[in-house]
Amino acid sequence: MFFQKNVVETGRIIATTHSPLFLMPDTRRPDIKCVAFDMDGLMFSTEDVYWETASIMLQRRGHEYNLEIANDLMGRPPKYGFEKMIEYYGLDEDWETLHAESDETFIGLLDKGFTMMPGLPELLDRIESQGIPKAVCTSSSRRVAREVLGRSGVLKGMQFVLAFEDVVNGKPAPEIYLKAAQKFGVHPDRMLVLEDSVSGCHAARSAGAFTIAVLAEHNRTLDFSHASQVAQRLDAPEILELLGS
């Protein structure tokens, strides 16, 4: 749970200044006008690339990456992630240095290839056939987002991309999804958000968006009870039905 400065009241989420945010059950049938995607682990198999990146970086320093810290960092912005890594492993470096090294290592590993997550092409086809605007909201840097989306051919179809540098408070704060709704020109409760991380789902629900957690090998053990729904893949019927036939 985290704290939110502004009051949000959509019928599903209620928070007051400096008070905890309570996520209530979301049973509505939303009228979806736009779709916001997380990127890593949701659209593409890049969580595996991030695991290899972190493993390489820590091996250089005599440490081993593990699932405990990986789950904590999933979906979080770089500053949080690298400061946690510094604390966890007792590293004598600043987060900016680690971030720069991570981006270089990650982009180099992309040359080995990465894949779209199951159902992404079918989902993109449905969204485009319905004329629904779509965007990407990622905790990764602009540079990484540009590389991943550009290499995959998906970038050209996005109305906009919001990255780590575009917000002050990263996920699980709602800022990135509130900003996305503003750029779409819709109320947040008309926005469908697809996420694969706990922090990302908290961010989207807290913004007031209808939020679906999409399961994959890397996140099946995580608790997504705070999401509006949980789906097995991106082209699951419960997702497609929200977008029209």
Image (cartoon, rainbow, N blue to C red):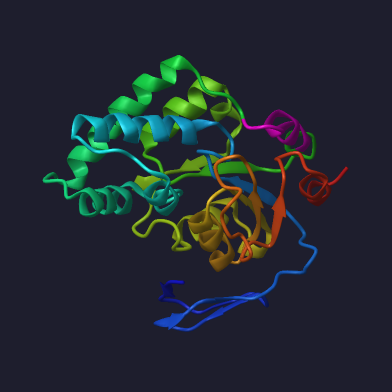
Q: Does the magenta stretch include residue 206?
A: no
**Who is closer to the viewer here, 18 or 88?**
88
The x, y position of residue 74, in whole percent, is 44, 48
Q: Position of residue 232 (x, y in %)?
A: 72, 45
Residue 56: quadrant of the picture: top left
x 79%, y 34%: residue: 129
Q: In this view, does 182 lie above or below 135?
A: below
The answer to whether 50 appears left or right of 193 in the picture is left
Residue at the far top in the pictured view? 111
Which residue extends farthest left?
Answer: 92
Counting from the top left corner in percent of width and height, residue 96 is at 20, 43
Instruction: Give 102 or 14, whichever is nearer the viewer.
Output: 102
Which residue lies at the image location 51% right of the left edge and 61% below the top edge? 203
Specify the quadrant that holds the C terminus.
Answer: top right
Of residues 185 and 66, the one drawn nearer to the viewer in this rendering: 66
Q: Where is residue 169 in the image (x, y as percent from the top left)?
A: 36, 60
Residue drawn at (25%, 35%), measured in percent from left and top? 58
Q: Is the stretch drawn in magenta largely helix, strand or loop? A: helix
Q: In this view, does 169 lie to the left or right of 8?
A: left
What is the tally of numbered marks visible in this picture? 0
Q: What stretch is highlighted in magenta?
A: 117-126
Establish if 190 lies above or below 54.
below
Which residue occupies the extreme right position in the image? Answer: 245
Rendered residue at 48%/36% (across/down): 47
Relative to 73, does residue 156 appear above or below in the rendering?
above
Is 166 on the left-hand or right-hand side of 216?
Answer: left
* Residue 187 seen: no
Is residue 144 in sight in this rendering? yes
